[in-house]
Image (cartoon, coloured by chain):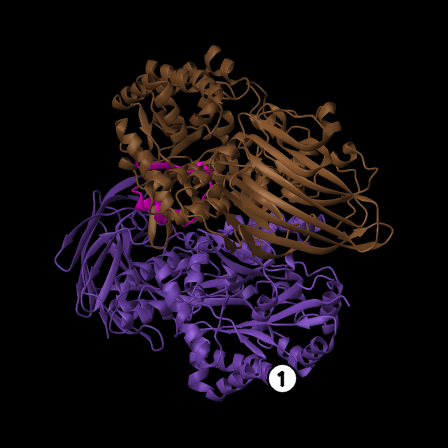
Chain colours: A brown, B purple
């Protein structure tokens, strides 16, 4: 009788630093009910990956769930698949850390009674060099999308077998995930999956169809809880799979104990198809969607999609300078603490992938995720002796100045307005300038949902098909920054300018200082920076801005001197962008000689002190991003601009105090 | 005044093992005249890469040319750019060999008076892991196509600067080559290039346009000698470049002494655009060309080409099993001789890229190039103790049997007809089975030339635009094999079958032995293989073929026993495919108990001895491939099939003697 082997796998993960209630909800709506129903079907086998952050939360909050997993493992119903413990994108961390991360999760699997040999490739980001790292970590197989194989020139019919891939003379087995199953399970009725699997039966005993995808699709994704549990989809699915003679259910290692890979392939750097859109710079992403939509309309997409490719995951470092800076700071500290296991533990945590990128999931736009990465980078750096350094930290071709004392790390970009792009507090383990600017994203202009699949619409829409219009109250407040957001950014503004114009970027910047190069020289505890720029009124008035930044025990002091060659009435504004995330602020204008900022669950309390009163413009920096639920309008930080009238010359001091 | 920096580079290479007259011709038509004219323009600067094989030939045959290079270097007119000495694709060789290969060419450059810091990326095959190898080899910059950058999401306007790229925390500078210049130089009139460069002038002093391409385009490519030298294109070009105030000519290192890279990018695995077509399996390559042609016809190609990608270079190992087998044998021996510098020298030679792939250039289809790779693998293996091994040599998921004595290495594939897929003579350093089967290539069906560029057709057609119709006399002889071509392949053939049907694959194979699995057990000096298969006459007649293969001092002996369960009149044919390359053979049928094969410049003399006379079918295996000149119909080997009548049982012995 013609049969088809079937491997069914899920990958469960919650980002490090996610809110407790999110873990709780995902546990109650997906992780727990899924395994409880699995227990009812002793014939059913699932290949499962739990990420480290999730296991740590479960161990702390739901210890009995681990016993359930142990018993399922003992009954042969669960094969544990591992990854880097803190779910890093393996290609984006040093190879030494890859080994430690994988070994940590293999240890945990052994504690549950399973000797794991396979890896779930985080975000399916492949890079050939991983073959060596994975083999060194004792891994024998890795799961990737069929999209990787098709990009390597294999046709659909060739994707129902695992293959070897080789690098530097070493090989590892790669299993392709079937994209069709990814759209069917669990969104379409069970019979659709069974029909599809039955269409694949053959007399070749080694033919296999692989499903492996997010466990959150079974109860956490919008609408799936009711569909998967209350309407009984999962029970029906487990029953249909285990009772169908044509479907030969097995785990990855069972398969590899019977069959060897079918041949040798070389996979390009790739992830899954949607990622290749998200990782493109916004302008190119828009062009990419336009191209894909046209091909779909002309009915050509299915035929030629294998040749249609966007960006690769690491392009997020090109797309989001803040992600790149965080990543390169992580790499820097990882190298420095490699021989210090305690410090290293924090760096491994800082490698959790989610805060470094954004698509429909994943959260560079989620401040609490970024905060967790910074927290762990800073905690690791506490183990290092403070030292001032001048080096190109983020490889943008220009050097940064890192000033450090026992309390703070300040990273200044002389070439970008001489401003502070990192102000990390060692005591609080927070980066005060963890602020994202407001950027145009291509999906701001392509609100209509991705075209749903052609065939019948039974079941529920997958995340990629949800309709999205931008609500009017958001559109009114939506603005795009022309500047990156740092601390001590030097503006020249018309006296009559309004806060609303300024915050919605409808104002006219008179000076050329904010994003232009400053010269510098190192001074005691800090650095002196200056620029001979200009104020562009009716004609260009040469202007010099000079600032001495000194780190103090509780923050920094900045002494400013501003000179205009010819008198001109303007406002000189010093902008300080702070990572205020947990208190929702409103735009506000006030006069003050000093004021406090309070962000209880974020950067805590801070005081800004001036040596003379100034008008202060305060406003929240809110970005628009997409998420499972549709639109998120998120406060990435708060901007405080102290405005001093100037006509010829101006001197003042700004003091930043951590409280 | 607005200016544009311009970097002009050429890459000169001839594959190891290429005919002497090819080196001579390229020297006379390109390498020499180019440098002699350069000497006339002291202001002109060229960044040049000479591959190791070319330098070795020049040192031996044209030593005074090296003095010309030395003087040009001394005058500051030449910057030497290096690569792996024997022009390996760096991504496809072990990292330990990368370092040695690059160091060898840097040594040579020092001998010429230049301390090279830059790498010409062979066939521009990029892989992120190369950052570490290149940095370790003291390299600071590498030259790649702008296609790599556009695939990473950069727009055209961003490609006039070098960037950093990073892997594992290390960075290297990458210069993008401008594709527009690649089509203009030297094919279009000089003023076109000047107009284009002048259109790029800007007030940003760091903006730069880079041309770097094959030196053979200046005199070796069809039609270019007359155009570049006799019609004075090169002199006009050098003059126009050096006398144009808006064009600031410089070398790579001069640029890097003045400017730093513009930012950080992450490049996908890629090479140049045409390579992504050639590296696809034929069926997919046809689909790819179809897709590109449609987009061109719809005028969409320029806009969306950045998202249109085919295969990656290593897919050639998937496309050509013979290339993959050669590559994995190289890797195997490279590992074994790593600590033996003398043996290693040969392996480094075996890494010369050209024989491993094929597009319009490069030569898996050129037997003399493959022969040189095998020669060097075998010469390296001579340093190893002979040993029998059972292992999956080429990672196709099935084990091979390697039988070895002092004189020979035989690699048998039990799963593919129990045949010998490598028979390497240690004395002659030749692989007797270095034979390519006849495969369909997508360009067999898309003869019309690639559409030439839209704008005016002045100048001469670039190689990618030459018209190609398959001549009738070739089309008549063109056939595609259903089998790989090995030694001792077991056929069952109808008695009345003709040689012509057999050689043009119009015959009916009665047996299921040629490409099906045999069981085996090791015996003294060899291996015994057998299969219980069938002969498919009116109905299936179970049949058993058994063969004992023993290596001897001068070759091998194969003792056959063939049994049919029921009597059936057929011919049992044992096919031996030999790498006869230098003698053009004709199809021939003869009776013989023994016969000799003579291939003076290839595998030399061999004798096949039978213990009883048999009918022998001999025919040349000719493949159709494209080359600069249009079509090549190349003899890849000669097939000899000894046909024995069989009705119930048959025993015979075949002896292969190296003379």
Q: Where is residue A350 in the image (x, y as percent from the top left)?
A: 45, 38
Give the residue furthest to the front: A611
Q: Where is residue A15 in the image (x, y as percent from the top left)?
A: 47, 30
Where residue B527 sits, quadrant-wise, is bottom left
Q: Where is residue B513 in the image (x, y as percent from the top left)?
A: 29, 48
Q: Which residue is identified by label 1?
A: B37
Mark 1 is surrounded, within 10 Å at the Cα level, by few (under 14), some (14 to 19) or many (20 or more) other residues, namely some
Vertical comparison of A518 with A42: above or below: below
Q: Which residue is drawn at 61% across and 40% down?
A: A655
Vertical comparison of A637 with B566: above or below: above
Q: Residue at x 61, y 85 (%)?
A: B39
| Helix, strand or loop at mark 1 | helix
Quarter of the image where the N terminus of chain A is located = top left
Q: Nearer the viewer, residue B470 or A588?
A: A588
Q: Report if residue A137 lies within the magenta region.
A: yes
Q: Give the range drawn in magenta.
A: A117-138
Vertical comparison of A368 with B178: above or below: above
Letter of the chain that mark 1 sits on in the rendering? B
Q: Nearer the viewer, residue A516 or B495?
A: A516
- What is the number of callouts on the image? 1
| Position of residue B422 in the picture relative to residue A392 (left or right) | left
């Amino acid at each position: 009788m013609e049969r088809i082997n079937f491997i069914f796998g899920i990958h469960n993960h919650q980002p490090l630093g996610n809110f407790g209630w999110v873990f709780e909800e995902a546990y109650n709506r997906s992780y727990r009910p899924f395994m409880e129903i699995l227990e009812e079907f002793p014939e059913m086998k699932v290949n499962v990956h739990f990420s480290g952050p999730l296991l740590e939360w479960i161990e702390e909050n739901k210890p009995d769930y681990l016993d359930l997993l142990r018993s399922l493992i003992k009954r042969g119903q669960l094969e544990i698949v591992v990854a880097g413990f803190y779910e890093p994108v393996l290609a984006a961390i040093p190879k030494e850390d890859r080994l430690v991360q994988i070994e940590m999760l293999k240890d945990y699997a052994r504690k549950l009674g399973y000797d794991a040999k396979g890896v779930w490739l985080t975000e399916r980001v492949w890079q050939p060099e991983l073959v060596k790292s994975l083999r060194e970590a004792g891994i024998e197989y890795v799961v990737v999308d069929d999209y990787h194989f098709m990009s390597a020139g294999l046709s659909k019919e060739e994707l129902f077998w695992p293959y070897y891939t080789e690098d530097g003379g070493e090989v590892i087995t790669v299993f392709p995930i079937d994209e069709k199953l990814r759209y069917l399970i669990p969104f379409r009725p069970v019979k659709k999956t069974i029909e599809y699997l039955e269409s694949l039966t053959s007399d070749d005993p080694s033919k296999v169809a692989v499903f492996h995808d997010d466990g959150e699709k079974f109860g956490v994704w919008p609408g799936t809880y009711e569909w998967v549990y209350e309407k009984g989809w999962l029970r029906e699915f487990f029953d249909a799979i285990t009772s169908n003679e044509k479907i030969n259910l097995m785990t990855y290692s069972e398969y590899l104990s019977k069959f060897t890979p079918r041949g040798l392939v070389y996979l390009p750097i790739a992830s899954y198809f949607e990622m290749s859109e998200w990782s493109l710079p916004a302008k190119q992403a828009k062009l990419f969607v336009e191209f894909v939509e046209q091909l779909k309309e002309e009915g050509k997409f299915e035929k030629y999609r294998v040749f249609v490719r966007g960006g690769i995951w690491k392009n997020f470092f090109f797309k989001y300078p803040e992600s790149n800076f965080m990543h390169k700071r992580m790499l820097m500290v990882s190298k420095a603490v490699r021989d210090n296991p305690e410090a290293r533990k924090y760096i491994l945590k800082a490698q959790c992938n989610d805060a470094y990128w954004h698509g429909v999931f994943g959260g560079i736009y989620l401040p609490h995720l970024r905060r967790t990465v910074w927290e762990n980078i800073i905690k690791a750096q506490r183990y290092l002796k403070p030292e001032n350094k001048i080096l190109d930290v983020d490889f943008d071709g220009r050097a940064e100045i890192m000033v450090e004392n026992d309390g703070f790390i300040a990273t200044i970009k002389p070439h970008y307005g001489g401003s502070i792009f990192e102000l990390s507090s060692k005591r609080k383990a927070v980066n005060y300038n963890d602020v994202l600017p407001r950027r145009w994203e291509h999906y701001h202009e392509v609100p209509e949902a991705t075209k749903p699949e052609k065939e019948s619409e039974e079941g529920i829409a997958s995340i990629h098909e949800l309709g999205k219009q931008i609500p009017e109250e958001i559109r009114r407040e939506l603005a795009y920054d022309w500047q990156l957001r740092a601390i001590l950014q030097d503006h020249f503004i018309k006296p009559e300018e309004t806060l609303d114009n300024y915050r919605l970027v409808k104002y006219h910047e008179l000076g050329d200082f904010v994003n232009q190069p400053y010269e510098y020289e190192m001074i005691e505890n800090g650095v002196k920076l200056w620029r001979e720029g200009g104020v562009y009124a009716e004609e260009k008035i040469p202007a010099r801005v000079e600032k001495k930044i000194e780190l103090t025990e509780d923050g920094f002091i900045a002494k400013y001197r501003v000179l205009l060659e010819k008198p001109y009435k303007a406002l000189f504004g010093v902008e300080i962008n702070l990572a205020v995330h947990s208190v929702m602020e409103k735009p506000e204008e006030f006069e003050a000689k000093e004021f406090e900022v309070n962000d209880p669950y974020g950067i805590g309390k801070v005081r800004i002190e001036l040596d003379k009163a100034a008008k202060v413009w305060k406003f929240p920096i809110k970005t628009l991003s997409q998420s499972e639920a549709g639109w998120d309008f998120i406060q990435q930080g708060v901007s405080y601009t102290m405005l001093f009238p100037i006509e010829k010359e101006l001197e003042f001091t700004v003091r930043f105090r951590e409280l």
